[in-house]
Amino acid sequence: MSRIMRFHIITIFPNMLDSYFAESIISRAVESKLIEIKTYALREYTKDKHRRVDGKPYGGGPGMVMWVDPIISCVDKIKKNLSRKKNLKIKIILFSPGGKQFTNTIAKNISKKYTDIIFICGRYEGIDSRVKKILKTEEWSVGPYVLTGGELPAMICVDTISRQVKGVLNDENSLEETRIASHEIYARPEIYEYNKKKYKVPKVLLGGNHKLIDEYRSKKQNKTASK
Ligand code: SAH
């Protein structure tokens, strides 16, 4: 039997993530106990009486920096909650636009090696650098652009890694790396008319000759999916 993969997401906006995870393939995977997703509201772990989790940067500069203590307290709590489970393999990831580019290959490896992934979502200017040092986290970026927070990256990574967990996709063949995936895909109707122009499905796909179909698909292959 395959084991469950648990995701722990530390954020100041847990509601942002809940609606995405409550639908479609991800919610089915949660119901089937293939994955588990928990969000942790960072404000519950601050000692500040106004529940603040950030402050001005030392040395000046714009924006606010997320404090080290609430994040460390939250991670400690997560680890403590997990401590009774057997064969734990925990990985902690911090999101940063300057981090290592997240890829499908990373997703695949993570799904194989770990039982628990803790994602730390930044906001504002980012996270106090001591978090990275204390927790020895890896920093991941989801792309060469700057977002307002780590919540979208967390959704992207949970989604991509979950897809690699055995049983999450009903049809294992949907995993791009096990077949020839094409950018060009078609379903009904065979001919679609729009503004007096006809848009047809390529003939080769209608013929049922699988050798020719594979050749056609290789030509139109989705090169990025298997990287
Ligand atoms: N001034 C900061 C920007 C911080 S953006 C800098 O240039 O580093 C605020 C937070 O959003 C970050 O801490 C990170 O958690 C998240 N974030 C923004 N863009 C991201 C990206 N491309 N990949 C992953 N996380 C990102």
Image: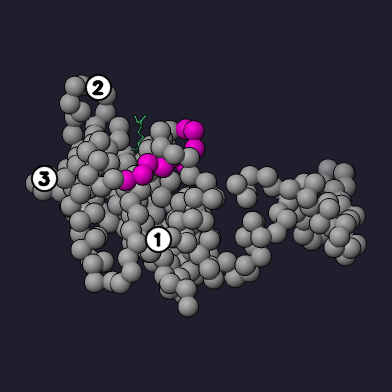
- Against 84, residue 223 (above or below) is above
Q: Amino acid at mark 2?
A: Gly
Q: Residue 48: which disc? A: 3
Q: Quick one: which residue is furthest to the bottom in this view?
A: 1
In front: label 3 or label 1: 1
Q: Which residue is mark 1?
A: 114
Q: Is 122 situated left or right of 167 in this image?
A: left
Disc 2/disc 3 C-alpha distance (Å): 23 Å
Q: Amino acid at mark 1?
A: Tyr
Is 139 in the magenta?
A: yes
Instruction: Evaluate if marks 1 and 2 touch, with contact meaning CB atoms under 8 Å apart.
Output: no
- Against 103, residue 124 (above or below) is above
Instruction: Evaluate if marks 2 and 3 touch, with contact meaning CB atoms under 8 Å apart.
Output: no
Stretch in magenta: 137-145
Q: Does residue 212 appear in this view?
A: yes
Q: Who's the residue at 33% across and 51% down the image?
A: 92
